[in-house]
Amino acid sequence: MHNILMILRREYRERVTKKSFWVGAVVLPVFLGGLIVGSILLAGFQGEKQRHVALVDATGEIAPAAGSKLTGEKLKDGRPMWIVEQVPVVGSVDETRKKLSPRVLSKDLFGVITIGPDVNAENNFNFYGLNVSDIGATMDLRNALHESVVANRLKNSQLSIDQKTLDALTKRIDLETFQESATGGATKKGFLQAYFATFGFVILMFMSLLLYGVAMLRGVLEEKSTRVMEVLLGSVTPNELMTGKILGIGLVGLTQMLIYMVTVGAVRTIILVKMSGADMGWVQDTLGPAKLAYFMVFFLLGYFFYTALFAAVGAVCNSEQEAQNMQQPLTFLLMIPYIMTFFFVRNPDHIVAVVMSMLPPFAPMIMFTRLMVGSVPVWQVALSLTLLIGSTWLVFRGAAKIFRIGILMYGKRPTIPEILRWARS
Amino acid sequence: METAIALRDVVKEFDGFRAVDGVSFEITKGGIFGLLGPNGAGKSTTIRMIIDIIRPDSGTIEVLGQSSHRNVRHNIGYLPEERGLYKKMKVLDMLEFLGTLTGATPRDARKESQQWLEKLSIADWAGKKIEELSKGMQQKIQFAAAVLGKPPILILDEPFSGMDPVNQNLFKDTILEINRQGTTIVFSTHQMETAERLCKEIALINKGKLVLSGTLAKVKGGFGKNSLLIEYEGDGAFLSALPGVAKVDAYGSYSEIRLDAGADPQAVFSAIAGRLRVSKFEVVAPTLHNIFIEMVGATATPVLERVGDA
């Protein structure tokens, strides 16, 4: 026990005091978190700005209605979101538009909307602006125009409809999404956000498992090639050495995850505070404690499963080159669930997803994904966890045996059947 | 006399190659023992089995009266032939870590490491990374690592390789001091001069088999006082042609001559007295070097790098 602790202590101290650790643990999440918070805040600020838009309407029928719809939308402080300028057509629509373009370039106008004479023609509605990637704003404009055109068509049809009825008929609807859960009650949830949060977590898990797996492999390889192994094995048993190393590197991983989780928590708080009033239920749910707990549990189990495998691979390799080749199958094993996640987020209850979430090498990422985006029966979670824990234990024991024999084999690389024989011995 | 380490019929095979083939010998507690043999003889494999890094296929190894398993780990300090240190670690941190593995707390291990660094006059390097040190310095660190925790048995695999004469002397004195305090010392070496000067007991192995073993005096006695040591001026090329001379080991102005059984040293003296200016003439037992050459040389074959024996 003392030996395991001392090995753990060395692994932890040597790794945590390295610059690369802090780059990975602090700089990266701060940078990513800053990016997310920054873009949300930026989007928020833009939303608070009043915008001037000019309408050039050859029909003379659409612009007034669209204009009043736009001015009807209010910012949080009560001011209208849009200030609309009706510009009469002088010459052609295009000529009128061109006269306005200096004001667009000087940012006096957010943009110019042109409406051609025939509302049913193609390319009849155009927007000219500097910023055409502001999806929120262009959606707003499109909706206002669309509603006005529909109203106009209705008015010009044989049906005689008064303005009030027209407004009622063309009133916009909002689609809200709810997730059913077995525990009863449905949670309001933004699917898009849940997808992205899931991808974020799975990418984090994949990268960390690979990173610490390879760190383990290289550590063992270094000990082997520098013959530190011989000195260590004069004092400790191979089991103690492997256990100490895995726990030590595991603790480093845990430290990193803790830093990540604190960052996520901070981002969550900032989003919730800054966007108060807006509908942020998804943040509460997607980045909430339950989801973070799932992540930690599956990350840790996956970590022990894969690091033990990487340790065994490190023990049977003799050179960097050999290790590169030998670690490839393990990397593939990690990539399968990672890639599948991109399909399973849309279809978490597909039979393949269900089966894969039970298989230990894939369970950490796949079961986590299913928990994030769907609702999973308790028995499936329990079975998945049981299998994962059981197989991790087996892998650990097998790896310890391979480790014991492999670390002192210099020269010839053992064959796969030989390795399997060691694992069973 | 008590026994520190006892090997009985130890066999270890790698892929059908017998690295160690039925070796038995005993190492007396408190003594200085030399495990001798040419490169690839099975010395390192034998040592690895003693410290339970690998296990023999058959035969038994006892350390301090107990089977060489888990319980033996804190009883043996080990200096491997190749450096076994983390290159990126700082000297004092490295020693502290290895010290803790002998059961000490980090604080005690650090204190003891510090003392050893001072004793070996490398305290100034405590904060440097291992990779910044010269080979000889690293050897000192490795030595300090082996003696941390005062193990009752110290196994040194080629401890003097890469050391300058001053540091060789420092090492030798330190080793003798540790031995006086009761530590059993085991050398593994192919430097016969070192073994001859330091060891009280030896075991010579070749091609995995024990060739001879016992106290140095007994081993040499077995060969009888049949050698001559002469120092001279002049051309000694004719020496090997003299009657009664079996073999000449010439070093310029100095030769070691082994006589045929029953040959009279006096007759040889008479034969050379007129032809060379002799400044020294001594009848001695053969040196370990010559015993080694004689025992091993006859069967010497090109040394192959084999699995498990570097």
Image: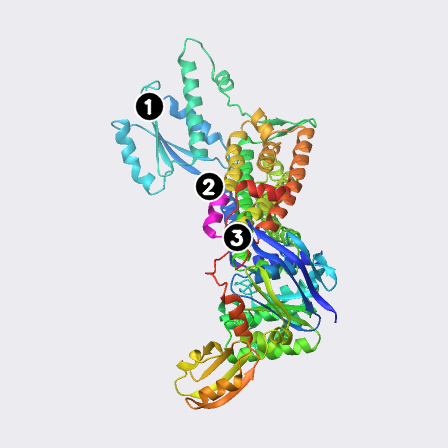
Residue A47's spot in the image, x, y percent? 48, 39
| Relative to A343, residue A243 above or below | below
Quick one: label 1 or label 2, which is nearer the N terminus? Answer: 2
Q: Position of residue A352 (x, y in %)?
A: 56, 26
Same chain check for tags 3 and 2: yes
Left or right, B309 with reference to B53: left
Residue that sits furthest to the top in the current view: A158
Q: Is residue A251 left or right of residue A174?
A: right
Mark 3 or mark 2: which comes first in sequence?
2
Which is closer to the viewer, label 1 or label 3?
3
Q: In which chain is the residue bearing label 3? A: A
* Both marks 1 and 3 on one chain: yes
Q: Which residue is mark 2?
A: A46
Q: Chain of mark 2?
A: A
Q: Please name the residue that numbered disc 1 is placed on.
A: A124
Marks 3/2 in contact by CB < 8 Å: the verdict is: no
Give the residues drawn in magenta, as a range.
A318-328
